[in-house]
Image (cartoon, rainbow, N blue to C red):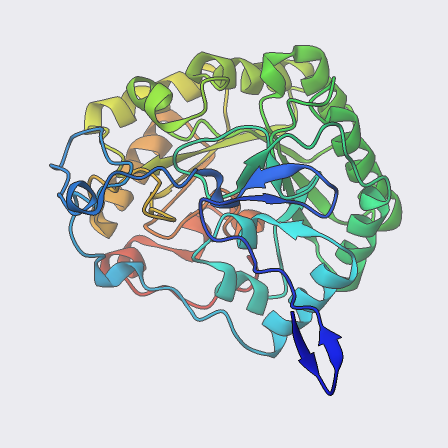
Amino acid sequence: MSAFKGIPIREAPRPARSGEKYTTAQGFTAIKDGMKSTAPNAQEAAMPVEAGSTGGVGRVNGAGPKPAWLRAPLAAGAAFAAVKNIVRAHRLSTVCEEAKCPNIGECWNAGTATIMLMGAVCTRACRFCAVDTGNPRGWLDSEEPQNVARSVELMGLKYVVITSVDRDDLPDGGAAHYAATIRAIKRLHPGTAVEALTPDFAGVTRDVRTVVDAGPDVFAQNLETVERLTHTVRDPRAGYGQTLEVLGAAKRHRPGMRTKTSLMLGLGEDDEEIRNTMRDLRAAAVDILTLGQYLRPTPRHLAVERFVSPQEFVAYRDFALELGFLECVSGPLVRSSYRAEQALARNNAGLDGAVAARTIFPRANSA
């Protein structure tokens, strides 16, 4: 221990590096960025992955350098700082930060954020996701529903997306906590539309209904990828059919409510698999679909197999609309909650075909 004029100076603990295990403020252990530091040796890690393969943890991108159309606005500015201060003051987690979203600069500068409930540690370890993993052992912040509602009021949001980590350690997967948060927002700010981007609740229909009964305007659960790649991409406790059933159960329980899901592209899927996945989603009566480019968050996560061009995203959107989706927001930097309140404007959330083809992204009015 160092000293200053004879007074011992206790150094602050070093923040956990990506892949390291650490102890949270609540006293349980977690792995930073979700994947352990067990990457292959340096020589193997430097070997490229052939495009179209499904390997990739610890390997460089098989798709080559990142193209110019994947540039995102910088995370800086007065509005960005204001949102950050509200998030910190109310002890909130955001998927924008925890999942290393490339759109955080655009969205926070527009005064919006996607709020992540039940902490920043997930009980699952999907191979595409940079959220920390661990077992929170039942921990919950009982003040969170009210804190979230107050934050929504302070930001003056007309539309808010609330999402969460998976909480398999809770008997109901956190469904009651979700419902309490939705009701708190509706009480304090009844004019705000709420999109609930939920975990799959292990496929338990009762827990899905708990959230739906709280009155979200949109119920979302992300399918993430095509059926063939689900086991490679998602945690073993997730499932292609399970997500489809969750979305279908939500729609059957409240037919008038919109349902929504998202797919990442560039993980090794082919065109026909993408189209078949869209057909499966329409069979489950899903209303809204978002399509975006998968971007590898750390070297321990799955490699990018290909970079999908803006023109291809336009073509996928056209096919989705032909199938009957109310909207398909489709573009390289699109994420499930990106410009969510614009999803029913029928203009690709402002990313029209001409803009997408030029790979220029206009300033958003909101995230």
Question: Would you identify the image quadrant in which residue 200 lies?
Answer: top right
Residue furthest to the bottom in view is: 5
Image position of 200 (left or right of 323): right
> Which quadrant, please, contains the C terminus?
bottom right
Q: Nearer the viewer, residue 314 or 244?
A: 244
Q: Can residue 347 be seen here?
A: no
Image position of 82 (left or right of 270): right
- Determine whether 276 is above or below 127 in the image: above
The tally of labels here is 0
Give coordinates of residue 143: x percent, y percent: 86, 45
Which residue is found at the position 50% from the left and 50% from the top? 338
Q: Can residue 130 be seen here?
A: yes
Q: Nearer the viewer, residue 207 or 355?
A: 207
Give coordinates of residue 117: x percent, y percent: 69, 41
Which residue is found at the position 63% from the left and 44% from the top? 120
> Which quadrant, please, contains the N terminus?
bottom right
Question: Would you identify the image quadrant in which residue 358 lies?
Answer: bottom left
- Determine whether 214 is above or below 59 in the image: above
Which residue is found at the position 35% from the left and 32% from the top? 320
Image position of 164 (left or right of 268): right
Question: Would you identify the image quadrant in which residue 133 lies?
Answer: top right
Give coordinates of residue 307: x percent, y percent: 22, 47
Which residue is found at the position 66% from the left and 12% from the top? 205
Residue furthest to the front in view is: 6
